[in-house]
Image (spheres, rainbow, N blue to C red):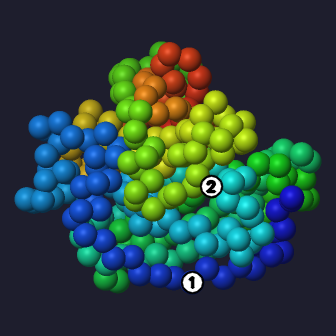
Amino acid sequence: MKLDPSRLMALAIPSRGVRYTDRETMLYALAVGLGEVADLPFVQEDALRTVPSMATMLAFEDGWLAAGGIALPRVVHGALDLRFHRPLAPAGLARAESRLVGLGDKGEGRGGLVHQEVVLRQGRRACCTVLSTVFVRGAGGFGGDVGAAPEAIAIPATAPDVISLVPTTPNQALLFRLLGDRNPLHALPEVARAAGFAGPILHGACTFGIACAEALRRFCEREPARLTRLAARFAGPIYPGETLRFSFWRQAHGLAFRAEAADRGAMVLDNGLVGLA
């Protein structure tokens, strides 16, 4: 199966309203690893704060895949790039305005990339612009790149300024899927093995959320308004229960980062960027 550029780029994705409560906001924070006493502003309803990367869950909707001729089991997350315009309310109504902005061709027999932009609004004001890339296995060779592609973020060749270890839990994918992404790749061993993995893998959006939580803890004093951007490319799987090793490099307006599976030395997130106010 190859991506069909004419079908995909002409696809109209209806805007939709997403209503959520403080329960979803707290569940998201717990699912990305926040839960210590210092994290109470994200997991307790008094003066509740929203983890900025929760925008990925409010923006998430995969119904357009079938309309575009893409089978869900062939799909994994390729990259995310979030621009934060103002903090998300801890509960309420968001409107997601979505469109496909480009396709990437990895070549015959290889993968195809689909780049989707979602603008999340609360009231008339934009809260976050989400640029999401999905990787469709075996869907390349359709004739070359089309439309816009995400910015390529370089990682310095120097030693990192900060290294941190963040464990994941064996049930983290099962917890995270309660937020809406119920792809069986993250729950059923037989589906994961058929896709070429040793077992169910953690959602890319969950790994991305863990990176957001770590940035909030280490560099933002847990203040969401200090985070202006978060971007990363998904370079490989992390299995629930493994430990992530983050490497951060300080830059003029934030940090570059990457993350690997600590025990395997395998890259999980690469070309990462944290923008700081």
Q: Is residue 253 visible?
A: no
Judge the density around disc 2: few (<14), some (14-19), many (≥20) Cα neighbours within 10 Å.
Answer: many
Q: Residues within 10 Å of mark 1 (few under 14, many from 20)?
A: few
- Which residue in the structure is indicated by mark 2? 133
The quadrant in which residue 90 appears is: bottom left
Q: CA distance from mark 2 to mark 1?
A: 19 Å
Looking at this view, is 45 or 8 the one in front? Answer: 45
Q: Nearer the viewer, residue 67 or 249?
A: 67
Name which residue type carries label 1.
Pro
| Residue 14 - label | 1
Q: Position of residue 246 (x, y in %)?
A: 43, 27
- Relative to 208, is 219 on the left or the right? left
Work out whether 258 lies above or below 187.
above
Q: How many marks?
A: 2
- Sequence-wise, which precedes: disc 2 or disc 1? 1
Q: Is residue 197 left or right of residue 231?
A: right
- Residue 175 screen position, x and y as percent: 38, 48
